[in-house]
Amino acid sequence: GENVEQHPSTLSVQEGDSAVIKCTYSDSASNYFPWYKQELGKRPQLIIDIRSNVGEKKDQRIAVTLNKTAKHFSLHITETQPEDSAVYFCAAISSYNQGGKLIFGQGTELSVKP
Amino acid sequence: DTEVTQTPKHLVMGMTNKKSLKCEQHMGHRAMYWYKQKAKKPPELMFVYSYEKLSINESVPSRFSPECPNSSLLNLHLHALQPEDSALYLCASSHQTTFSGNTIYFGEGSWLTVV
């Protein structure tokens, strides 16, 4: 079945620096890759997603890139701010015969120091 | 509006109690989900309802019993839970099931403590 690996597990940056989180997936049939941000004590919130027919997507300071050949996708946050501190989860959709389920990576705890 | 509402926000129950978690969405979504989440870990899928029918049960113990009374409501009935069941329980919904690449929207969650 689908497996999603996420690195690093923790990431500490200075305010204003960039942060990059990387994920790899195993199922070449996966076609949808969302990223969720979860602040302490709150729900996971979708921050950006990308579909397999697109190589890159950007929304203000956040961008996601997808390399289908290598089966990896990355989240890029520029000009980080303390409020970006949270746990970030990548995810991929498993193929239909695996139930079409959302498979999460293990999460990255991002800390942005003022 | 991407609102999924869950009640209660916090629940403390004994191992012999029976309680229920409730979830509601008014986005017209036809897929609803229950996830369990431990601190700083990814959400773990428990159940999926598609068009009000149970489509996925991830081998969840029978002490958790889901119910979908209508297309807007999803319940999770709890009975004879164990302390290790203490977690954040997240309800979610999507337009249709995730296979079609539909975005999942999570509720705020119900924090459950089993004593």
Image: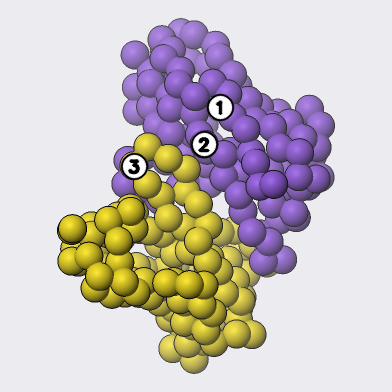
Chain colours: A yellow, B purple
**N-term mark: 1 or 2:** 1
Q: Secondary structure at mark 2?
A: loop
Q: Which image quadrant for residue A23?
A: bottom left
Q: Pointer 3 and pointer 2: residues touching (CB < 8 Å)?
A: no
User: Disc 3 and disc 1: Cα gap in Å?
Assistant: 26 Å
Q: Pointer 1 and pointer 2: residues touching (CB < 8 Å)?
A: no
Whole-percent x, y for residue B89 in the image = 49, 34
| Residue plotted at (44% across, 88% down) | A70
Q: Residues within 10 Å of mark 1 (few under 14, many from 20)?
A: some
Give the number of the mark in front: 1 or 2: 2
Q: Subunit of mark 2?
A: B
Asked whether the residues under marks 3 and 1 belong to the same chain, the reply is: no
Name which residue type carries label 1: Phe
Residue A3 seen in the current view: yes
Q: Which residue is under mark 2?
A: B108
Note whether B34 is above or below A58 in the view shown.
above
Q: Which residue is under mark 3?
A: A40
Note whether A102 is above or below B106 in the view shown.
below
Q: Secondary structure at mark 1?
A: strand
Q: Subunit of mark 3?
A: A
User: Disc 1 and disc 2: Cα gap in Å?
Assistant: 20 Å
